[in-house]
Image (tube, rainbow, N blue to C red):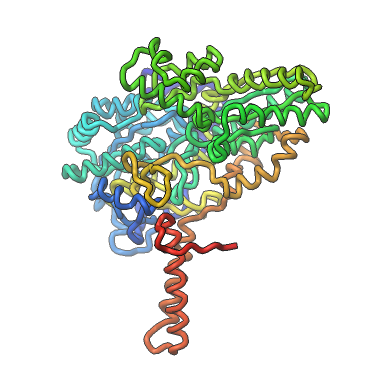
């Protein structure tokens, strides 16, 4: 991290210099100093069963309307002269793991702010959320930004504990906002950071603080994904960098013909990075946490699944291969998750690390002793700032390789395996991609989100996230919007039938891989070929110019989720119904409309309340 925050530094090489000259593209609605703000309907929550809990926790910011930003059309206020637009004071803070493209959020915010009124001021908080609490600022200017445009890392401002959660932290943040007389605070981060942004927004409204709080989805894990957020800034770049590394490993494996490479990738609660990289590089196997959790596979069942693949390849004379796993896989295995939870509880009760093994329950102690010494040491590491296990420090790939080797030796002794001796090489591709120069897509996406953030604040929105829909298409077709953070929230539940009870506080939770989605379906179609045919693909390094420079994540393009477009389509059909069914229409038309509406309403009610036992269930082919 650059200690001299914001000081222009000499760029390291020609590639970085060329990247600095790249001008991100904007959709038409953002190409002027102002936008037209269109308010839609009030929003609900992602999980209707948790709506009441969310509404109770966020009484001031729950149910806010969906907002879209359009090009000015000459309506009142849309074309105000610059001297009629008051200067705006905004602060921005990095509150999440560094992710390629983060600097472009700041750049886009700065450019939009100065276009709105040149007298506006943008403050960056040095050292992340700790800088926010301590009011350590850097004024963001053109000169400050010069060395950070289209660059990787978060070294313009840095980051720290990545949370605004406790009453003391929220109070300190509010004090800073008041001292700086901020009109808006932009929080750049992932799932946890945006949950914190929602709580801060709610508190500031309750305390009559004028500062508007908005979030920007920046996360290399890609797990901040829902009907409003198609992907996060940084995901595309990280997957492209990792896919190139994986393809190198694949070619090395097939060249030597005698090693199995176990590659662990970023992805704590969801396997989005692993899935995207698998579709880009075509490794032989991918073990996804979502599959393991759904099937409730034990550790040894996972090992046997891998060994069966090794054996199937050996029968074809192949004694090499590449296996991908997400770093969160270990928590998806039921008995490992339970062990990690026990250790976590002992940490929370301030039990010394050296005494934790002696205080585990009998079954947990037995599992703990079964594991290799290096895994035991890593499981005992102190927790992250959010009280979760340090998954990046747990060598799950080495654990799997160790147990697979033991199982293959056992199968050899029993005569079930007659191939060559199993040999493994392990890698963790975690930090190699986080500071990469961002792809064109991430540069554009982040810059656009920065612009949207300014227009959200200018419109007086708080407790919202900047969003862009239709990302699979060229930039000029992107739909710019703002969605309430509470609409993305849910409450964890005990999964025990209709009487499920909420646990914990409402929050934005990581979105897992959709095992019924198109991307996963494509992987399943290719799985057999990937396993046996060495159908390796080399995507190459990130292309900044030329034919491949605008390539986007495969999962983004195949899933085709234009939620905002679907909302518009629904409005069009509702308007058509209103046009057709007017007073004076035939009685038959009116009856047909009523019958159709009853049917549609009943189906949608069932879909919205799946746990309501009083409603009949329908099965559709």
Q: Residue at x 48, y 62 (%)?
A: 617
Q: Looking at this rendering, what residue extends furthest in the top direction?
A: 354
| Residue 305 figure quarter | top right
Q: Is residue 311 left or right of residue 362?
A: right
Residue 288, position in %: x, y?
Answer: 58, 35
Residue 458 showing in the rendered view: no
Q: Nearer the viewer, residue 225 or 384?
A: 384
Residue 292, position in %: x, y?
Answer: 57, 36
| Residue 595 figure quarter | bottom left
Q: Residue at x 43, y 52 (%)?
A: 480
Q: Looking at this rendering, what residue extends furthest in the left direction?
A: 208
Residue 227, position in %: x, y?
Answer: 45, 51
Residue 494, position in %: x, y?
Answer: 39, 42
Residue 547 showing in the rendered view: yes
Give the answer, above or below, for where 232 lies relative to 254. Answer: below
Q: Nearer the viewer, residue 609 or 184?
A: 609
| Count of numbered circles in the view | 0
Q: Residue at x 30, y 42 (%)?
A: 198
Q: Is residue 539 left or right of residue 358?
A: right
| Residue 309 figure quarter | top right
Quadrant occupied by the N terminus: top left
Quadrant occupied by the C terminus: bottom right
């Amino acid at each position: 991290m650059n200690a001299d925050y914001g000081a222009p530094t000499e760029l390291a090489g020609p590639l970085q210099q060329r990247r600095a000259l790249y001008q991100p593209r904007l959709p038409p609605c953002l190409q002027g100093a102002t936008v037209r703000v269109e308010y839609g309907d009030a929003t609900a929550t992602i999980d209707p069963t948790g709506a009441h809990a969310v509404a109770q926790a966020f009484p001031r910011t729950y149910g806010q309307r969906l907002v879209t930003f359009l090009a000015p059309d000459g309506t009142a206020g849309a074309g105000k002269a610059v001297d009629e637009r008051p200067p705006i004071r905004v602060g921005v803070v990095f509150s999440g793991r560094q992710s390629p493209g983060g600097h472009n959020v700041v750049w886009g915010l700065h450019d939009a702010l100065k276009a709105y009124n040149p007298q506006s001021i943008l403050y960056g908080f040095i050292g992340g959320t700790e800088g926010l609490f301590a009011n350590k600022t850097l004024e963001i200017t053109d000169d400050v930004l010069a060395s950070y445009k289209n660059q990787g890392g978060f070294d313009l401002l840095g980051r720290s504990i990545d949370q605004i959660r406790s009453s003391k932290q929220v109070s300190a943040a509010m004090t800073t906002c008041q001292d700086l007389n901020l009109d808006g605070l932009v929080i750049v981060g992932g799932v946890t950071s945006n949950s914190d942004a929602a709580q801060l927004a709610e508190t500031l409204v309750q305390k009559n603080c004028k500062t508007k709080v908005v979030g920007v989805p920046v996360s290399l894990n890609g797990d901040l994904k829902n009907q409003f957020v198609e992907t996060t800034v940084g995901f595309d770049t990280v997957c492209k960098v990792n896919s190139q590394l994986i393809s190198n490993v694949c070619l090395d494996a097939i060249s030597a013909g005698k090693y199995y490479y176990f590659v662990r990738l970023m992805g704590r609660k969801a396997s989005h990075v692993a899935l995207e990289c698998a579709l880009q590089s075509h490794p032989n196997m991918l073990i996804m946490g979502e599959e393991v959790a759904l099937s409730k596979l034990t550790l040894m069942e996972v090992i046997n699944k891998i060994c069966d693949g090794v054996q199937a390849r050996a029968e074809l004379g192949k004694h090499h291969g590449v296996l991908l796993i997400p770093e969160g896989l270990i928590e998806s295995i039921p008995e490992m998750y339970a062990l990690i939870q026990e250790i976590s509880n002992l940490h929370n009760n301030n039990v010394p690390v050296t005494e934790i093994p002696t205080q585990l329950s009998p079954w947990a102690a037995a599992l703990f002793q079964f594991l290799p010494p290096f895994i035991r040491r890593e499981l005992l590491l102190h927790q992250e700032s959010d009280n979760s296990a340090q998954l990046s420090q747990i060598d799950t790939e080495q654990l799997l390789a160790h147990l697979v080797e033991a199982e293959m030796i056992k199968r050899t002794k029993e005569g079930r395996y007659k191939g060559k001796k199993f040999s493994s090489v392990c890698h963790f591709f975690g930090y190699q991609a986080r500071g990469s120069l961002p792809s064109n897509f991430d540069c554009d996406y982040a810059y656009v989100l920065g612009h949207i953030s300014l227009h959200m604040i200018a419109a007086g929105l708080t407790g919202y996230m900047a969003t862009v829909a239709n990302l699979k298409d060229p930039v000029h077709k992107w739909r710019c919007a703002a969605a309430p953070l509470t609409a993305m929230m849910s409450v964890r539940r005990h999964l025990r039938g209709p009487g499920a009870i909420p646990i914990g506080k409402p929050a934005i939770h990581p979105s897992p891989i959709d095992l019924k989605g198109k991307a996963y379906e494509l992987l399943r179609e290719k799985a057999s070929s990937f396993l046996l045919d060495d159908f390796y693909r080399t995507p190459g390094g990130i292309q900044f110019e030329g034919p491949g420079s605008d390539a986007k994540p495969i999962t983004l393009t195949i899933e085709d989720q234009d939620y905002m477009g679907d909302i518009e389509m629904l409005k069009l059909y509702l308007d058509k119904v209103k046009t057709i069914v007017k007073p004076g229409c035939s009685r038959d038309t009116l009856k047909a409309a009523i019958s159709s509406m009853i049917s549609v309403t009943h189906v949608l009610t069932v879909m919205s309340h799946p746990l309501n036992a009083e409603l009949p269930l329908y099965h559709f082919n």
